[in-house]
Amino acid sequence: MKPKLILLASILLLALTSAPAARAQWVQTNGPYEGSDVHDLAVIGTNLFAGTNGGVYLSTDNGASWTLDTMGMGLQYVWSLAVIGSNLFAGTDGSGVFRSTDTGKSWRAARTGLTGGNGLYVPALAVNGTNLFAMTIGDVYLSTDNGTSWRVADTGLPASDHVYAFAVIGTNLFAGTTGTPGNGVYRSTDNGTSWRADTNGMGANAYVTALAAIGTNLFAAAHYDGVYRSTDNGTSWRSVGTGLPANAYVYAFAVIGTNLFAGTYNGLYFSADSGTTWRADTAGLTRASYSVDAFAVIGTNLFAGTAYNTWTAYNGVWRRPLSDFGISDVSQITPIQNSIQSYPNPLSQSTTISFTPQAAGYAEVSIVNMLGVEVARLLTGELGAGEHSFTWDAGKDACTTGMYECLVRMNGQVETLPVVKR
């Protein structure tokens, strides 16, 4: 018997040592709960929030566990999430916008100025510095006071359009619309006060459901029409996306450095060359969870929220290491919190503003007043890692006494610093 046992052990050892390594794949987290449609994801520090058809869930341990707090909100159907500093905003299906200042433990309505009916249906929220935009059916609203009050900011947008997407490049704001007539991409250069269509090169049925920016490249996903790219602030577009299905319905984009992720009705796709070519990355995702509607990044992990499919038992939040996509320099997505300094502050004439990014990338440094209007642009361009300094001459820019903010946008992050002019 002994020789047979040795032979069997040898065969087992050979089988184990010659087996291929386990394939990297997506892993479903433990929530938010079985069957939950996840429509949006947001991050504050190491806190991950999921907006679902049953409220906003919070995970503090990379999805290992989730909690639900509905104080002040109730079990709202949450379509969208946004973050400004420590303020978390939730756009709902029929009840407007809610705000939480304590990481989702309690909520208060923030809808003064949002009109009834369509104005209370908020499928998308977006942030530009300290400005918060709420996209509704037929209207765009702007709040400059953390959702306390809102005003319409949609002159030039067709009244019948649904605005589902938003992107920023410098002082240009872009809105992606779906509806007839007038679907496509619209641009505003005055903080949303007025808009104009920028659809040259797009197909006639370019219902735009997602927008993203990588440096000066703008990407638009059009329902049943693929992905378009613009290199001239939306003035002209051309179709890109080799490897994407012809009928790919893109719900969401995520940008990490020069890498672009697309969440679609038929799975998740990844591009490492600014959208020119794509490959599917659905390993581990069940067929029922193929509809990817949201992305978020915490540390070295990418999270995807799934929704909409009939077999809802597998919807929820999924996790995968960024290293699986060849993204090893995670410093490019690390927030640059607490890196801005200004001296003197308060200032009488001028001040030196310095910050220290951890990784190289495209950066924008600007000064805005408390209405969110830009009063000075200090930098637009590529910067290396390490300390950089810029001088803001408030007197030269004819800025009066009052409170201002310095905004630093770099590597997908935004940091603000209050600056006081005496």
Image (cartoon, rainbow, N blue to C red):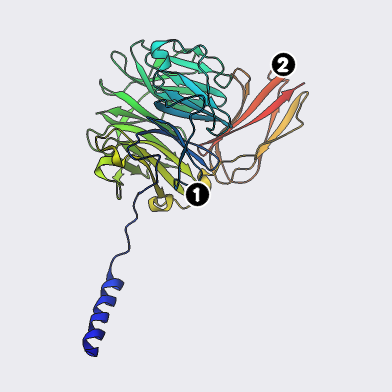
Q: Position of residue 305 (x, y in %)?
A: 37, 38
Q: Please tell me whether residue 36 is drawn above or below residue 203 in the rendered image.
A: below
Looking at the picture, which amino acid does disc 1 mark?
A: Val
> Who's the residue at 63% across and 42% down the image?
356
Choose between 285 and 174: the one closer to the eye: 285
Image disc number at residue 330? 1
Q: How many marks?
A: 2
| SS category of the residue bearing label 2 | loop
Whether tag 1 and tag 2 are in contact, CB under 8 A, the answer is: no
104 horizontally vs 311: left or right:
right
Q: Position of residue 207 (x, y in %)?
A: 30, 23
Examine the image and state in which quarter residue 369 appears: top right
Looking at the picture, which amino acid does disc 2 mark?
A: Thr
The 10 Å Cα crowd at callout 1, few under 14, some 14 to 19, many 20 or more, is: some
> Who's the residue at 46% across and 29% down the image?
81
Give the residue at the far bottom of this rendering. Answer: 2
380 horizontally vs 123: left or right:
right
| SS category of the residue bearing label 1 | helix
Q: CA distance from mark 1 to mark 2?
A: 41 Å
Choose between 215 and 43: the one closer to the eye: 43
For mark 2, what is the residue?
400
Residue 218 seen in render: no
Q: Please tell me whether residue 310 is drawn above or below residue 422 in the rendered image.
A: below
N-term mark: 1 or 2: 1
> Who's the residue at 43% across and 18% down the image?
95
Choose between 326 and 98: the one closer to the eye: 98
Q: Position of residue 181 (x, y in %)?
A: 29, 13
**Disc 1 vs disc 2: which is toward the camera?**
1
Q: Position of residue 352 (x, y in %)?
A: 72, 33
